[in-house]
Image (spheres, rainbow, N blue to C red):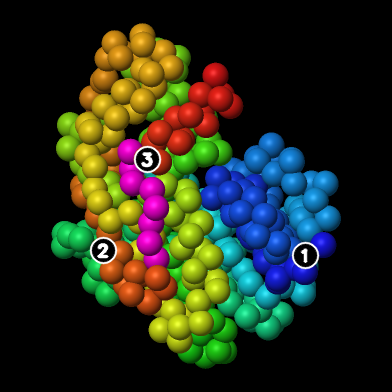
Amino acid sequence: MQEIKSTILITGGAGFIGSNLCDYFLNKNYKVICLDNFATGHRHNIEHLLGNENFTLIEGDIRNYEDCKKAVEGVQYVLHQAALGSVPRSIADPITSNEVNVSGFLNMLSAAKEANVKRFVYAASSSTYGDSESLPKVEGIIGKPLSPYAITKYVNELYADIFSKTYGIETVGLRYFNVFGRKQDPNGAYAAVIPKFVMQFMKHESPVINGDGNYSRDFTYIDNVIQMNELAMTSQNPEAVNTVFNTAYGDRTTLNDLIRYLQDELAVFDPEIANVKIIYGPNRAGDIPHSLASIDKGRKILGYNPQFSLQQGLREAVQWYWDNLK
């Protein structure tokens, strides 16, 4: 029996990114506590872990401070993934987005400080770059936020900075760029673009691209994100803490190219998919036209070395969707 390394709390641990982190760190011999209220996470993402003696599920809400305090007991590291994602959702309901993403974040940060947690790593967002037109996006240069969601994620960074300066807790923010991969939910009004397109193709339905398809994104496969979380959590470099890092592949792809890659990958399983027509709709409010990360800071300070390009990641993701959702 190998010795347990440390205890990690993963908030939002039943969600897409959180459940992948739970799997990974249990396999690396950590004790993992998952906190989730199942608002957007799914029990089926973590069902297979419930019998693992090193895994604990706490059904609770980050908006409830008592739940946060219970979750951080005896914890060395927090990987804070719990949030209400989606720009359109935040535009439709800014109040709930703020309650979860700002008040919930502050609750978790405060509880972690009180419990003397060693390091608090949190999911920040590329939406923080807002209306800044400079490419690639460099951590030190941001614009004005373009949505309530973007405001909430920027406020997270401000709170983390103040807490590290005022109370001495180590914080690391990871600005995620369009993460995709296994377990990402294709259903619901706010489903991310890749799983949504995959499901539509599999049903021979026409996917709808917002705009002319020339908007571009730095699509980032889940395994690159897991690597970044591990590095942010374990790095001994003093420059690694109390700062933020872009978490991306460092390349950009237009939506037109993305949908072509997806169609090609899926047509391997079902040749009919090659004939599905693409529909173009209006641009979406709050969307940034182009997104591309500089990952130089993460490479230099953390030793980040993303292993999966968009096309490599799409191949893996499509295989997973075909095996699990067909």
In the rendering, which numbered label is found on residue 286?
A: none
Residue that numbered label 2 is attached to: 294
Depth check, front residue: 1 or 89: 1
- Is residue 12 among what the camera can see? no
**Precedes in sequence: disc 3 or disc 2:** 2
x 51%, y 63%: residue: 229
How crowded is the residue under tag 2: few (<14 C-alpha within 10 Å), some, or many (20+)?
some
| Residue 281 locus on image (x, y percent) | 25, 27
Residue 11 in the image: above or below residue 23: below
Residue that numbered label 1 is attached to: 2
- Is residue 119 among what the camera can see? yes
In the rendering, which numbered label is found on residue 312?
A: 3
* Span of residues in magenta: 304-311
| Label 1 to label 3: alpha-carbon separation | 33 Å
| Label 2 to label 1: alpha-carbon separation | 38 Å
x 22%, y 39%: residue: 254
**Precedes in sequence: disc 1 or disc 3:** 1
> Which marked residue is nearer to the observer: mark 3 or mark 2?
3
Rendered-image quadrant of the C terminus:
top right
> Which marked residue is nearer to the observer: mark 1 or mark 3?
1
Query: In what element is the residue under mark 1?
Result: loop
Q: Are marks 1 and 3 in contact (CB under 8 Å)?
A: no
Answer whether residue 32 is magenta in the image.
Answer: no
- Residue 83, quarter of picture: bottom right
x 70%, y 64%: residue: 30
| Residue 12 locus on image (x, y percent) | 61, 54
Tell me the amino acid under the disc marked 2. Answer: Ser
